[in-house]
Amino acid sequence: MTDGARAATRTGPPPREAETHCPYCALQCGMVLRDDGGGGIEVRPRQFPTNRGGLCQKGWTAAELLDHPDRLTTPLVRDASGELRPADWDVALDRIATGLRTVRRDHGRDAVAVFGGGGLTNEKAYALGKFARVALRTRNIDYNGRWCMSSAAAAGLRAFGVDRGLPFPLTDLGRTQTLLLVGANPAETMPPLMRHLADQQARGGRLIVVDPRLTATARQADLHLQPLPGTDLAVANALLHIALTEGLVDREYVAARTEGFDAVRRTVAGYWPAEVERLSGVPVADLEETARALGTAASAVILTARGAEQHAKGVDTVSAYVNLALALGLPGRPYSGYGCLTGQGNGQGGREHGQKADQLPGYRKIDDPAARAHVAAVWGVDPAELPGPGVPAYQLLDSLGTPGGPRALLVFGSNPVVSAPRAARIESRLRGLDLLVVADFLRSETAELADVVLPVAQWAEEDGTMTNLEGRVLRRRALREPPPGVRTDLAVLAGLAARLDDPAPVAAPAPTGGEPTSSGPAGMPDGTAPTGGDPAGAAGSTDAADVPDRFPTDPRVVFAELRRASAGGVADYAGVTWDRIESSDGVFWPCPDPEGPDTPRLFADTFPTPSGRARFHPVQHRPAAEEVCADYPLHFTTGRVLAQYQSGTQTRRVAALRRAAPRGFVELHPDLAARLGVAEGDEVRVASRRGELRAPARLSPTIRPDTVFAPFHWPGAARANSVTNDAVDPVSGMPEFKICAVRVERA
């Protein structure tokens, strides 16, 4: 096999190919899968605007999980002895349905909760939100994307009236004159994106990176600002202060296209660069150079990512950079603007169609009467029967098994035992449930705690759509059917819905709840009834066909319904069809008309706010939720490494990736290591008020001497989220993953 191909052995149908996209990050790199019919699945990159023929190591090896020995191919049910044992599908689904009925009867509808994932296709995310609100009639649903994009989303909504990670195509980055990256390390998190940054620099553009570590991305920058973790907001306000004092603000743009600037101007007047240098450690000269590079450029882009957003003041931090972008007149100008680098594969689409606690499809608010009426009509229920808003992800998980909290949880596409902040506490909450159900294709750490584990299809075994970091809707194409015994998530939801269609009485209906009507949704856009099913997902199923109208298993039918449900919403997909996606390189939302244009670039003429203007919001720096002290004198921050992804459930099982990054580590500055008596490779203990991790020391002069870093991909003793702070942003519900106080010692 050549270096350009990685294979997973299997037997299967005659050779065939599928043009699809990588299953990992939000770049959604284009790739071709080829099944040679004789035991090999080849991965090849393809020319697509985001990756331009490139793949990272994770993409090259993605097919190795399709036939991995750890692949789940039969349901598992925990028996009386406490062991997970193989079971057939009817036994597993009946066990779940009985457990859900019992919990609902004894504790009420909201005692059942659903937790989704940012890697689910649009069809699955939409169906999951509908399932929670129509089949379960619970308000308690949220997803792990709350820990990825929520702060940038909230800031974008209050400034621009819309949340789309990049309001312009990714290729614009290669054409901008100055690019400011705040808390982003795409060289390790989405390497093919670096081709666009190389284009930008090759054209004479300047790349400026703000990061507490000298990352692989920062090493390629023209200027690196290295602030103390948690001080990004103060840095942004200082940059705007300099722009004001040096006459760099675009006052004509501010007057014509924005509102609220005076309050922001008064706020940033107090952020003298010398004071911010003392607070953040960023030299005045670097602050001035950055402000001038942005303010004098013919075009400029400001991008934020998790480093700036995963804080208890994450929304305000993003707002500070949005304020800077607006003051400089960037949003809506060619090759300019503010954007956010979405993390998970469908982090954008996954937050648009109903997985979020306060949301209905099309990015509608669940407490908006007009939104409820529209979606209820599509779903064939009375608007009064839809539950109200739920609570954000961490609050939901932390309430599990507590008085008044959910007693049952269904998890799709997430591994909170590793990924949740204060993870030991969340693990304990999960262990205390009456019923835990996990749908996954591998036995994750969360699946190990489950009462029922359901084996579901992987990315190369399902059709559907994804929405990447640009707001570009893409087609995921199946190469093959799932293995025998495996079903799609859509088939799982249909099977459960069929069993819950005649629910037992519940203890107390939710305040906005009620029994659903017997009528299904109205017809599809072409006037026909939904037809067909998911042949892979329905294989062996005797129940999925019982509710085809309400919970179809054919993803094309689900997407047609999603289009109708999103029509007229902020994220309007009504004009997006699979055929249209396939005839081009995807379709950018909003796209309300099948015959009309899509929207690659937003804000050229107006903003989708009531006034048509973008809105400034004054924000003040405030300390981290937990400051250092004598007992915990160091700052702790987390992040990713090149060869691993998210909680590592997938990538830790790929041999090449495991060789590249075999275990967790703790990165610390050599000066700090010398004071602690720690040498390279020594096992160290990092302790916070919430827990500890143990991992080998990795000494690096690229990190600040007052800060230590650990990647969050590993479970067990090296679990970084045993240490992290569960304080949350009051607006977005984002936990403070990126800073807490710790002490470090040799283990």
Image (cartoon, helix red, strand yellow):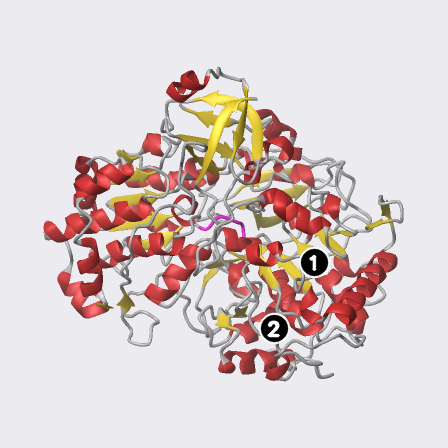
Q: Does dot 1 land on a helix, a strand or a loop?
A: strand
Q: Quadrant of residue 7?
A: top right
Whether label 2 touches label 1, CB < 8 Å? no
Given residues 64 and 428, the one toward you in this image is 428
The x, y position of residue 120, in whole percent, is: 61, 55
Q: Quadrant of residue 493?
A: bottom right
Q: Is residue 173 visible?
A: yes
- What residue is shown with label 1? 409
Which amino acid is tagged 1? Leu
Which amino acid is tagged 2? Glu
Side of 133 relative to 224 (left or right): right
Dot in front, 2 or 1:
1
- As for residue 476 lying within the magenta part, the answer is no
Rendered view: 244 above or below 174: below
The x, y position of residue 471, in whole percent, is: 45, 59
Rendered view: 463 above or below 725: below
Lower position in the chain sequence, tag 2 or tag 1: 1
Label 2, label 1: how far apart the Cα atoms are = 26 Å
Side of 618 relative to 313 (left or right): left
Q: Does dot 2 land on a helix, a strand or a loop?
A: helix
- What residue is shown with label 2? 561
Side of 237 relative to 252 (left or right): right
The span picked out in magenta is 342-346
Q: Residues within 10 Å of mark 1 (few under 14, many from 20)?
A: many
Q: Residue at x 48, y 38 (%)?
A: 639
The x, y position of residue 616, in whole percent, is: 27, 63
Given residues 424 and 125, the one toward you in this image is 424
Figure quadrant of the N terminus:
top right
The x, y position of residue 376, in whole percent, is: 60, 80
Predominant SS along the magenta part: loop
